[in-house]
Amino acid sequence: MLKQIKGLHHVTLLASSARENNAFFTNVLGLRRVKKTVNFDAPDVYHLYYGDGAGTPGSVMTYFPFPNAARGQLGTGEVGTTAFTIPVGSAGAWEERLATFDVKSTRDTRFGEVRVLFEGPDGEHLALVEKDDDREPWTGNGIGEEMAIRGFHSVDMRLRDAGASSELLKFMGYETVDTKDNVTRFHVPGGNEANVIDIETLPQVGHGRQSAGSVHHVAFAVENRARQLEVREALMDTGYQVTPVIDRDYFWAIYFRTPGGVLFEVATNEPGFDRDEDMAHLGEALKLPSQHAHLRAELEKYLEPIE
């Protein structure tokens, strides 16, 4: 069993409009945009990162906004809900805030925790979970500390058969916490606060169709490149097809497909989002991977302007 994985690092989704996406996550949810860059494989598409003040692993939601992309169809073989933690007692304040932006929400309880459920601009399923969480929030977008998002709580994997993916999570260091109805909760001890994975078993539901609003992949955090290589070797020894290490500028990444169909990434906590920007100005300038630097003039004309 692996001990290197410390919880979630980031979650990456697809979107249909950079401007709407940016407005929702900064203005409505109050997160900080910590990086404005482009997709390594499609430089005419933004890669936007939102999180706490520093873009701490375990707090960062990222998006590839493909202009005018059709909306995805939620099903199995993917992540259905991405959840953030909020202070205990702040669910009501969040319901009121979401309503002021014409965002409909509902409330439920899962494993004893209060959740506010709502959708993002492309129909992505999001949740705010009341939980004691000592992480420092970003309060620079008009939301006070008493209700500000702390970071990720969990992701909810929707699978037709949970067996093999459950065994994978256990191999990755997660422990089973509880099962209620068709949902099993896993938790990785000794990690960051983004340490929960829920598996929802839906044997009668067809596979999802990924597009705008879909989760593209889920990334797990390791401390550094040495720990990442240990994880890669262990996964390959177990029979998983794992990519070589890829430099993503702000972290190094490896990828593999889970038995249930969800794409997993293992990302390093180093070097961080301040490697090419001062911490006080994260996410302000368009930053380009070195291989796309020569395209700057063209991209600045083409990419949709965002505040």
Image: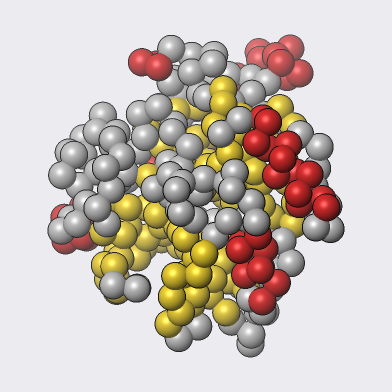
Residue 255 on image: x %, y %: 73, 46
Residue 208 falls in image quadrant: bottom right
Of 196 and 210, the residue lying toward us: 196
Residue 302 visible in the snapshot: no
Of 85 and 294, the residue lying toward us: 85
Give the residue displayed 58% in from the left and 19% down from the top. 287
Query: In the picture provided, is 299 more to the left or to the right than 236?
Result: left
Of 72 and 3, the residue lying toward us: 3
Above or below residue 223? Residue 73 is below
Residue 90 on image: x %, y %: 18, 55
| Quadrant where the image shows the N terminus | bottom right
Residue 248 visible in the snapshot: yes
| Quadrant where the image shows the C terminus | top left
Residue 244 falls in image quadrant: top right
Above or below residue 138? Residue 169 is below
Above or below residue 111? Residue 25 is above
Give the residue displayed 45% in from the left and 48% down from the top. 190
Residue 226 on image: x %, y %: 68, 31
Give the residue displayed 46% in from the left and 54% down from the top. 189
Residue 88 on image: x %, y %: 19, 57
Report how many numbered discs are placed on residues in the image.
0
